[in-house]
Amino acid sequence: MNPKVSVIIPTFNTEAYIAKAIESALEQTLTDIEVIMVDDGSSDKTVEVAKSFTDQRLKVIVNQQNLGVSAARNRALRAAQGKWVAVLDSDDWYAPERLEKLVLLAEETNADMIADDLYLIKDGATSPWSTLIQESGEDIDIDKILQIDIIYFVETDVYGQAGLHLGLSKPIFKREFLVKHGIEYDETLSIAEDFWLDMKCLINGARFFVVPKPYYFYRSRPNSMVRQSSLSRLNQCCIATNSFIQQEVVKKNPALMRALSYNLAVFKRNLAYFKVVVPIKEKKWLTALTEIRKNPYFFYDFISRFKNIIERRIQYYVMGNKLVFDISYNLHKKRKITN
């Protein structure tokens, strides 16, 4: 008989964190689960730590070479047998009751996907500093389950701006829905892959609910994927957004087109800014000058960001806050994260 939930965990060089992630899945109050860990070519002891667990519900799959987080997740998805699929990043963990709570509410609401709030916790901290919803600025009744439509999902997840940012959430998905619509992660993406999987579900009519209570612990750490190159991150976001906009189903939805077009414009503006900033940091003056000529608004952007740039550098170099540039740690300063 198939398990109720398949928990999929992609890993890459997280030997210091993976045990906690696996333990939190195996120790769920909902015991009818399988845990599928796909290691994406780690060079540390991540696989060794995982294989030290003797619980038969844990399956460890190893990629011989690094294929990327989306490919690792897709391999786990294809191996999953549960009615529901839950994603767990290898440096995060679940509260013990998370899966039981979400599955119960998903079945009550006939959901295709359901997410909870996220606890936000700094690496090394013993308790969360806030939650995703608390930092969003959205007026949300924490005692009511929200149904999320695709327009609201896009409009409240704009790069560099305050909002709910449900692209950071970790819904559980009805596996039958994913299979029916052929939905998998985009393997060209190594950032924001959760956002675009959610978008694929929503554009195919998924009933998406959010429980405004946190059961997922989202760890901010200096070497996480969310801190990769701003140029790489923004390039991927521009390409993915532009590609999504080209779909006929999107073109027939004016409100969605407006929301996505706005997001794309924001990505492009920030990309143009970083195409100047990155060469300056690397002392590639000719490249920076060339990009300034292409971006006449650079100096206006720079001046508007200057105060926040100074504040963050004081935090980083003087106060020793190594997470000051981390996306999740700066949710409450989303308007200030673009330098």
Image (spheres, helix red, strand yellow):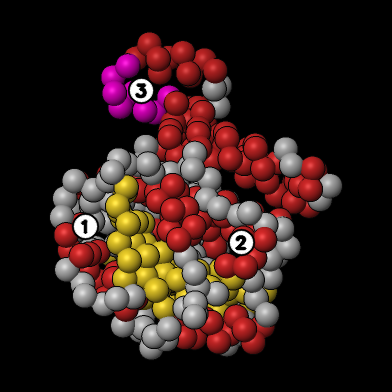
Looking at the image, tell me whether mark 2 or mark 1 is earlier in sequence order.
1
Kind of residue at disc 2: Leu
Is residue 292 or residue 106 the one in the foreground?
Answer: 106
Q: CA distance from mark 1 to mark 3?
A: 38 Å
Is residue 299 or residue 76 the one in the foreground?
Answer: 76
Q: Which residue is mark 2?
A: 178
Q: Nearer the viewer, mark 1 or mark 3?
A: 1
| Image vertical order of residue 115 relative to residue 247, above or below | below
Quadrant in which residue 58 is drawn:
bottom left
- Span highlighted in magenta in the image: 276-284
Residue depicted at 46% across the width and 13% down the height: 290
Farthest residue in the front direction? 1
Q: Is residue 283 left or right of residue 114?
A: left
Q: Which residue is mark 1?
A: 47
Mark 2 secondary-structure assignment: helix
At label 3, counting other C-alpha atoms closer than 10 Å, the crowd grade (few under 14, some 14-19, many 20 or more) is: some
Q: Which residue is mark 3?
A: 279
Looking at the image, tell me whether mark 2 or mark 3 is earlier in sequence order.
2
